[in-house]
Amino acid sequence: MEDYKLEYEVERALKEEGYRFKVVTDNFDGCDVVLTDHLEGDIFVLCHDARECIRKLQSRFYGKKRFEKLIVGIDPGPKPGIAVVGDGNVVEEIQLSSVEEVRTVVNSIELGYEPCVMIVRVGDGDITNRNRIINSLLDGYMVEMVNEENTSESISNRNVEAAKVIAFTRGKRIREKMNIVITEGYLREIQRMSRIESEGLLTISKTLARRVALGEITLKEAIELARGGQ
């Protein structure tokens, strides 16, 4: 690589993932795959950041330049879980910290894997967050909603493990934006989370909680607004 910082980051990522590798400069004899930021050719994998490099490697382990079909399963919730399945193989698991991260992460997944076809499957639980996630993805992806009715008994982790089940389950294609349904119970839950986040110092109002539920502001921003109004 010409970018030494990128080379260091890629080496660190490969070590963390447990991959064996060697650094080469100009002699590529015996190399099946070479990660690079400037060369082109059949054995070269062009990448611009460490995570992208790791993702572009995955299909090569299955003897393919790219996956024919990539499925992204998402377990909706305040902290969504994501499972990435390439041609029937689970190739990545991701735990997010907020719904707002979903579109950015899905974009990076598509960029990294460069599949021929990509489908995003979202579980039908947690209606409010489910609809927010679906609405954030509809303008760029094929989105399906999966019935989770028979999945909860077989899994203990309601995030990433649930996302795997969702990824392997066919759903109903969603073509139009969903209505954001906000219940009183959901608003109270956001208020409860605001007390935890603020270490018991305050509880945001229902008005602010509704804005959080709609995705207009984050919980952290709502707490700051509440502090400003004290």
Image (cartoon, rainbow, N blue to C red):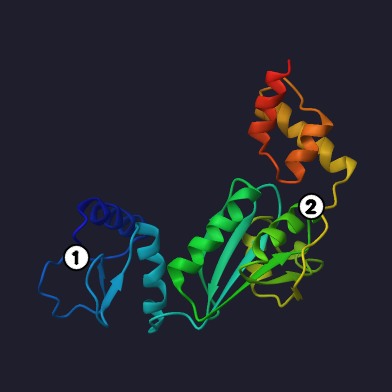
Instruction: Kindly state the secondary structure of the residue where label 1 is placed.
Output: loop
Viewer-proximal residue among 147 and 152: 147
The x and y percentages for residue 189 are: 80, 38
Instruction: Between label 1 and label 2, give the one nearer the viewer.
Output: 2
Q: Could you tell me which residue is drawn at 68 percent across and 39 percent down?
A: 217
Q: Residue furthest front?
A: 139
Q: Could you tell me which residue is drawn at 14 percent across and 67 percent down?
A: 24
- Residue under label 2, please give it: 128
The x and y percentages for residue 114 are: 45, 74
Q: Could you tell me which residue is drawn at 81 percent across and 53 percent down?
A: 180
Q: Could you tell me which residue is drawn at 48 percent across and 61 percent down?
A: 108
Instruction: Kindly state the secondary structure of the residue where label 2 is placed.
Output: helix
- Dot 1 crowding, Cα within 10 Å, few <14, some 14–19, many 20+: few
Q: Residue furthest right?
A: 184
Vertically, is 109 above or below 157? below
> Looking at the image, do the residues carrying marks 1 and 2 touch, with CB atoms under 8 Å apart?
no
- Dot 2 crowding, Cα within 10 Å, few <14, some 14–19, many 20+: many
Viewer-proximal residue among 87 and 98: 98
- Residue under label 1, please give it: 22
Q: Amino acid at mark 1?
A: Lys
The x and y percentages for residue 155 are: 70, 61
Numbered circles on residues, count? 2
In the rendered structure, the answer to whether residue 60 lies left or right of residue 147 reads left
Q: Amino acid at mark 2?
A: Thr
Locate the N terminus by quadrant. Answer: bottom left
Mark positioned earlier in the residue sequence (1 or 2): 1
